[in-house]
Image (cartoon, rainbow, N blue to C red):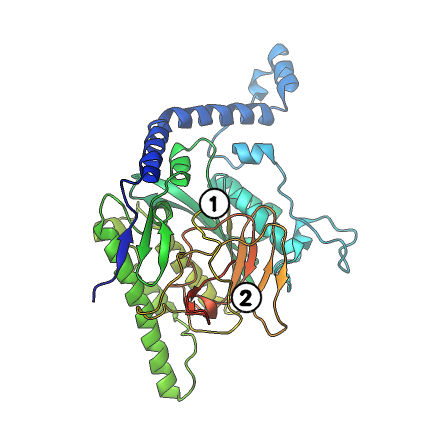
Amino acid sequence: MPPIVEVCPTFSWQQITSLIVVQALQSCYRPLNWLGSIVEWTINFFLLNGGLFRLLFKLFTFQWGRIILPDPTADNFLSCVGALDPRCDLYVDTSRPGKASSTRADAVVFPDENVGSRSTADVCVMAAKLAYENPAVVKRVVKDIWKLNFVKFSECWNEQQQMVNTQAFIFTDKPKDANAVVVAFRGTEAFNAYDWSTDLDFTWVKLDRLGYVHQGFLEALGFISRKHPDTIERLNTNAIESSEATEAREQAEATATRTPVTPHRRSKEEIEKAPPISGLAQGIIDDPAKEQAYDAITKRVGLILNENPRAKLFITGHSLEAHSPPSTPRCSTTPARPRLPPRSEPSTPSASLVSATRTSSTTRTPSSRANFSASSTATMWFLESRSTTSSWLTSTSATVTISTACTTESLFRKNPTGTTASCGQ
């Protein structure tokens, strides 16, 4: 039986309205982008020269050689987000022993034993904000101010939009024996019409045994292009084959060792040679200038987790929450293997990690391995390292306003109600 794929109706009034708005926004891309460049350059021009009065003083006293012209690629050029909120220092918990007189960023406790702590949430909140800056600024802040280990800034290809329009960066708490790996995605940029058109795009895709996924986010992660419907079928097939291959390896290992089935720990060689999940054409996948976000980031994170088996994974960023129905069950407290449920079982109408209430905090039984706590401006969750990177990023993007902790065993498992369990509400 072929995989089941369903695409949302094209001619509903909602879709027609969405299409009109999306087309109108995309037609404004160039003028809006130019406006944003002018606004950001002007803001940085005044900031770098000490404000309007100091700039006028330099002009009237003929100190023209001291006037600084902004360079958009420099490590001191801020986006509108960075200019509006210039804070770069991380929160320091002064209530901890030895921290009472410390305000240094290198005194931050990260990762905290309590994943819902304010210091841990602050790192994720600040990383979500920092993701709007250029690679030079991100690297400088992570290394010089936060005193953490910068790994990579990724600028990934969106085949539907025919441009590089998905950005994320990776860092760890230290170069070796890391305890935390953080992936921060950039959200909607103020002057990027394509970002806004993605937010207002109502189209969805239902993937076999995964549920309903926002089509714009699938495209942003380099999975599909709606111009080529066959990419959706290939994505669905690739995801199922990857899950079934992992399940087969786990079963074989359990049979050989005569032990219960446990999550498979992928070797470095397996991670490097893993086939892509993307449904795009092979020519696009092989093009080094068209890096697909999901496959590239999961491979890099998988290698880091393989070298640092004690590390926890945090994913953060600002993004759209509307693609996450509130009916999705919360992360199960019972360990289970990270795989898709059988095709005959019903699935939840969501393939994403969804948000919890903004100000709520829920802790389960003492034996629970899931801990939920709220963060006011960014999503954060961690997965214990299993090196099973084919399933660590089950959502189509990082979302806003929650802090969630969950283990990889609970991803894609069947809960008692018969629906597919995912981390979140």
Q: Is residue 143 visible?
A: no
Residue 89 in picture, x, y percent from top left? 65, 44
Label 2: element kind: loop
Instruction: Report x, y in % for residue 111.
Output: 61, 60
Read off the residue under disc 1: 319
Q: Amino acid at mark 2?
A: Asp
Residue 416 visible in the snapshot: yes
Image position of 41 with respect to 103: above or below: above
Can you name the residue that lies furthest to the front here?
A: 13
Asked whether, in this view, residue 342 is left or right of residue 418, the answer is: left
Judged from the image, the secondary structure of the residue bearing numbered disc 1 is: loop
Residue under label 2, please give it: 177
User: Which residue is outermost to the bottom?
Assistant: 258
Residue at (21% x, 52% y) in the render: 230
10 Å crowding of disc 2: few (<14), some (14-19), many (20+): some
Residue type, label 1? Ser
Q: CA distance from mark 2 to mark 1?
A: 31 Å
Q: Earlier in the sequence, mark 2 or mark 1?
A: 2
Front tag of 2 and 1: 1
Examine the image and state in which quarter residue 199 appears: top left
User: In the image, 379: left or right of 200?
Assistant: right
214 or 267, which is in the foreground?
Answer: 214
